[in-house]
Image: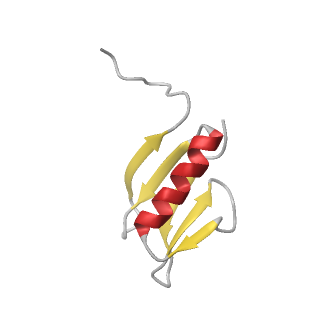
Amino acid sequence: MGKNQHVTRRPDGNWQVKGEGNLRATKITNTQKDAISYARNIAINNSSEVVIHGRDGKIRDKNSYGNDSFPPKG
């Protein structure tokens, strides 16, 4: 399983995709939507998770593209 990808807002107002534990952004975009799309592609290829942070920096959503340790029952 690869590194989780975090989508966060930058001080300049742009959005970034950053691998968990990385010091530098993998990608910088103008919109959160573009950053999420880029992060999703990385997460699918690495069987990892996308962690989406809102404008306030708090985690807003998570999407798993790997082996889910808590799959839905049913």
- Left or right relative to 54: residue 27: right
Which color scheme is applied? Answer: secondary structure
Residue at 49% x, 81% y: name it.
11
Q: Quadrant of the C terminus?
A: top left
Q: Is residue 19 left or right of residue 55?
A: right
Tell me which corner region of the image, top left, top right, bottom left or bottom right, holds residue 27.
bottom right
Quadrant into which the N terminus falls:
top right
Q: Nearer the viewer, residue 23 or 40?
A: 40
Q: Residue at x 36, y 22 (%)?
A: 72
Q: Position of residue 37 (x, y in %)?
A: 48, 57
Residue lying at the far bottom of the rendered structure: 12
Marker count (numbered): 0
Residue at 41%, 64% (x, y): give it: 33
- Toward the right, the furthest residue is 23
The x and y percentages for residue 65 are 52, 37
Residue 30: x and y, percent?
47, 77
For image coordinates 50% across by 49% down, the residue present is 50
User: Of all residues shown, which one is farthest toward the left?
Assistant: 74
Q: Is residue 44 above or below residue 17?
A: above
The residue positioned farthest toward the top in the image shown = 74
